[in-house]
């Protein structure tokens, strides 16, 4: 079985005694003084100073041992009354131990007696919690999981005793009902309590308050810190087309004419919401050109209704996030006919015979012509 050792440290204070006959008393007086006590009389070292002085012929002299003086306490040399001479500060010194020497000059030689005074300074809640800053900005990504540590607040309190310097935290949002965060009352850790969504709430403003835990609730001191939590965007939304999926253009439109304005929305921020456009399919004959930034779709070559009266393009919208997200749309472009085709006879020469006694209005022959234009453009008149 291994040996178990322990050690103790003893501190001894050797107190020099004044010259002459000395009576060493085992008397020690304990005293508790609040640190906010104003300089005044604290106590009397003897119960009946007048009677004692008469008994000793008025030859008693009281003093604090020279080695123990630090300016905070004084003793009336005649009455033995103890006075607080200078204000105390628990955070600087929480305990005083000094000797009061009583010298009796009614005897020869003079007799000295010593009383030890142990003065405990009682801490008062005279310091408020403090933060290093009055306003801070915190950033957190919107895809941060619930329960993630966001920040640790660390307020300080200059009081010395446990409860007066023990800090608890609580938070309040500037907009009630919009607070996806929780602070641990003791550790000051701020964590997420619900999913974040920058597109719904981009910024949360919190008031973080630190309070000490003084026994008397009315004596507790507070200090607050304004916190702006910025929700950082992640690329979690695809572009959505907002332009109409149908367009019309005249067949006689000159090259470069605007056919349609392609638009899309992406609620993400910055590059994540920056959208570019392209034609994925349906433009094999290169009849159209699409500006990737503006979304303007223009004609790139002459159109001909008689060759192709409808074009079906598949459009692609892509954001600039990482990874990129995209969506597509089918755009149907109808080419509008114009009267740009002349009628053409099916034959260059028609031959027919008619009897000289044939009645007016009787059928002679059929003449046919073709017009490639549509609709009313196919109605024509024959003249000789």
Image: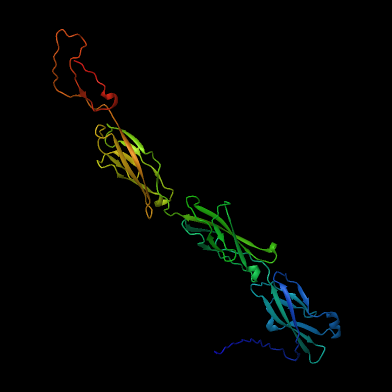
- The front one of 168 and 263 is 263
Horizontal side of residue 72 vs 289, given as left or right? right
Give residue 301's position: percent from left, percent from top.
Answer: 25, 37
Horizontal side of residue 315 vs 169, given as left or right? left
Give residue 20's position: percent from left, percent from top.
Answer: 75, 91
Horizontal side of residue 275 vs 184, given as left or right? left
Give residue 77's position: percent from left, percent from top.
Answer: 77, 80
Q: Is residue 134 visible?
A: no
Residue 344, quarter of picture: top left
Q: Residue at x 73, y 75 (%)?
A: 32
Residue 105, quarter of picture: bottom right
Q: Residue at x 26, y 36 (%)?
A: 255
Q: Residue at x 72, y 73 (%)?
A: 33
- The front one of 146 and 15 is 146
Q: Is residue 51 visible?
A: yes
Q: Residue at x 23, y 26 (%)?
A: 371
- The front one of 24 and 10 is 10
| Quadrant, the N terminus | bottom right
Exactly how many numbered labels are in the figure?
Answer: 0
- The front one of 19 and 17 is 17
| Quadrant, the C terminus | top left
Q: How is the image coloured?
A: rainbow
- Give the vertical position of 192 relative to 256 (above or below): below
**Residue extending farthest top:** 357
- Give the vertical position of 157 relative to 111 (above or below): above
Residue 362, quarter of picture: top left
């Amino acid at each position: 079985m291994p040996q178990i050792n322990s050690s103790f440290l003893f501190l001894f204070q050797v107190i020099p005694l004044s010259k002459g006959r000395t009576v060493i008393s085992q008397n020690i007086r304990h005293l508790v003084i609040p640190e906010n006590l104003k300089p005044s009389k604290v106590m009397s070292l003897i119960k009946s100073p007048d009677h004692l002085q008469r008994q000793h012929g008025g030859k008693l002299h009281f003093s604090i041992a020279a080695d123990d003086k630090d300016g905070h306490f004084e003793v009336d040399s005649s009455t033995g009354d103890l006075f607080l001479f200078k204000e105390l500060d628990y955070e600087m010194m929480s305990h005083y131990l000094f000797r009061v020497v009583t010298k009796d000059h009614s005897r020869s030689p003079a007799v000295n007696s010593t009383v030890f005074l142990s003065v405990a300074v009682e801490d008062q809640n005279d310091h408020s919690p403090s933060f290093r800053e009055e306003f801070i900005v915190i950033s957190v990504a919107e895809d941060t999981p619930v329960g993630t540590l966001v920040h640790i607040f660390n307020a300080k309190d200059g009081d010395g005793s446990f409860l007066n310097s023990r800090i608890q935290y609580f938070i309040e949002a500037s907009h009630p009902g919009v607070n996806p965060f929780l602070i641990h009352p003791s550790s000051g850790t701020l964590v997420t309590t619900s999913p974040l969504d920058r597109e719904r709430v981009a910024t949360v403003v919190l008031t973080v308050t630190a309070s000490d835990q003084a026994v008397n609730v009315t004596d507790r001191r507070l200090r607050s810190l304004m916190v702006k939590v910025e929700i950082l965007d992640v690329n979690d939304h695809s572009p959505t087309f907002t332009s109409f999926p149908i367009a019309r253009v005249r067949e006689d439109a000159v090259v470069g004419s605007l056919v349609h304005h392609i638009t899309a929305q992406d609620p993400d921020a910055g590059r994540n919401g920056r959208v570019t456009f392209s034609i994925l399919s349906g433009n094999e004959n290169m009849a159209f050109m699409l500006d990737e930034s503006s979304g303007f779709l223009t004609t790139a070559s002459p159109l001909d209704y008689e060759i192709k009266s409808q074009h079906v393009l598949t459009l692609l919208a892509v954001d600039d996030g990482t990874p990129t997200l995209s969506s597509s749309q089918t755009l149907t472009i109808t080419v509008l006919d114009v009267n740009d085709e002349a009628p053409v006879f099916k034959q260059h020469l028609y031959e027919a015979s008619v009897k000289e006694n044939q009645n007016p209005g009787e059928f002679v022959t059929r003449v046919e012509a073709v017009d490639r234009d549509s609709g009313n453009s196919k109605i024509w008149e024959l003249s000789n």
